[in-house]
Image (spheres, rainbow, N blue to C red):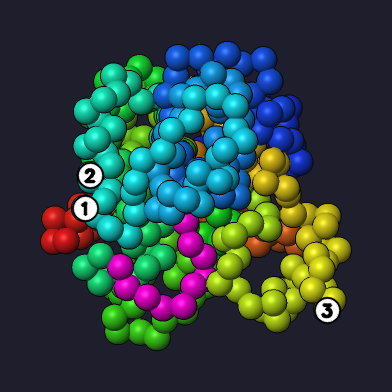
Amino acid sequence: MAVSDQIPTASGFHAKSTGDEVLAGLNLSGKTAIVTGGYSGIGLETVRSLAARGVSVIVPVRSPDKAAEALAGITGDVSTAPMDLADLASVRGFADSVSGRLARLDLLINNAGIMACPEARVGPGWESQFGINHMGHFALTLSLLPLLKKTAGARVVALSSTAHKLSDIRWDDIQYRDTPYDKWQAYGQAKTANALFANGLSRRLQDNGGLAFSVHPGGIFTPLQRHLPQEEMIALGWLGEDGEPSELARQGFKTPEQGCSTTLWAATAADLAGKPGVYCENADIAAPTDPSSPMARYGGVDAHACSDESAERLWAVSEALLAQA
C-alpha cells in the first residue's frame, strides 16, 4: 500500500460516533478477541462493546487488582491473564498460554501504550515508548501469528495516532543512544512504528484471509496523559488556565466511548475487505494529510507512515532486535 491507497469509504460514521453505534446490528458471538490495555480508557470501552456483542475477550493485565476493579461491571465473557509489554518473557508466556488453549483468535487489538513519558529503558535497553508501544506488541503478535493465521478472516488493529506526524522512524538512532531524548519525538516515532507494523503485518496475513490496520482514535482524556504536567496541557491548549478542558478540547476531543469507535470499525467493517494495512480515523479510512489545511496536524496520514519499503525495513529491524533480546 501507499498513501495513495488512503481513500475514505464514506462509512456513514463520524468523529463522535460511539463504539456501540459502530457495532449496532452485528452479532459477533463465537468470536474471540485479545485487547491489550483493555482495563483503562478507550481499551476498557473497546472490551465493553465487544463483550456486549457476544465476543469472548481476553485482557492481558499488568495490574490484576486494578483490572479486576475496572472490568467488574462489564457484562459478557471477559477474562484476564498476566502480561507486561515491557517484559518479553511475560509477553511470550502470555502468548504461549493463550495459544495452548484457544482454537481461534479473530481479533487482536494492540491498544495499550504510553505517551510522552520521561526517558526510560525497557527490555535489553530499548527506549521505553518504542519498546512498549511497538516492540512489546510486535513480540506479542509474532507469538500469536500461528493462531491468527489459522483463523479465517482474523483482524489485527494497531493503535497509532496523529502524533505519527511528529517523527518518522529515526533509523540511525531509534533508541536515542547518541542524541538527546525528546519525549514527543519519541512518541511520534513509536506511533509511526505502529502504523508501519500494521502495513507489514497485512502482507503476512493475506494468504490466510487476515487483515491488519492502524487507527488514530482521536484526542481523548484518558490515563494516557498521566505523564503530562498540568502546565504542559495548558500550553498545548488542552486545558484552560483553570485546569478544566479548554474550548478546543470540548469541541474536538472525544469521550472514551467515542474514542473506541475507529478501533471497532477497523475490527469489523466489511468496507475494509481488500484494503489491507490502511490507516483509519473517525471510523473510516483516513485521507492523506492536506498540508494546506489548518487542521493538518490533527487529521489525515503522512506518507512516511504508509510506506511499504519502510514497513519492511522496520519489520527486519524489529526481528533483529527480538533475536538479540
Q: Which residue is mark 1?
A: 89
Residue occupying the point 47% across, 50% down? 65
Amino acid type of the residue that numbered disc 1 sits on in the rendered structure:
Ala
Compared across the picture, whether 42 is left or right of 177 comes to right
Q: Viewer-proximal residue, 290 or 49? A: 49
Residue occupying the point 29% across, 23% down? 102
Mark 3 and 1 residues: CB-CB less than 8 Å, in contact?
no
Mark 2 and 1 residues: CB-CB less than 8 Å, in contact?
yes
Amino acid type of the residue that numbered disc 3 sits on in the rendered structure:
Glu
Please identify the quarter of the rendering in which residue 234 is found. Answer: bottom right
Residue occupying the point 80% across, 65% down? 245
Whether residue 200 can be seen here:
no
Please identify the quarter of the rendering in which residue 293 is found. Answer: bottom right
Residue 221 position in % (x across, y down):
68, 58
The disc at residue 93 is 2
Q: Characterize the magenta stretch by its predominant secondary structure.
A: loop
The Cα atoms of the two marked residues, 2 and 1, are separated by 6 Å
Residue 28 position in % (x across, y down):
53, 17
Q: Which residue is mark 3?
A: 241
117 drawn magenta: yes
Q: Viewer-proximal residue, 28 or 5? A: 28
- Label 3 neighbour load within 10 Å: few <14, some 14-19, many 20+: some
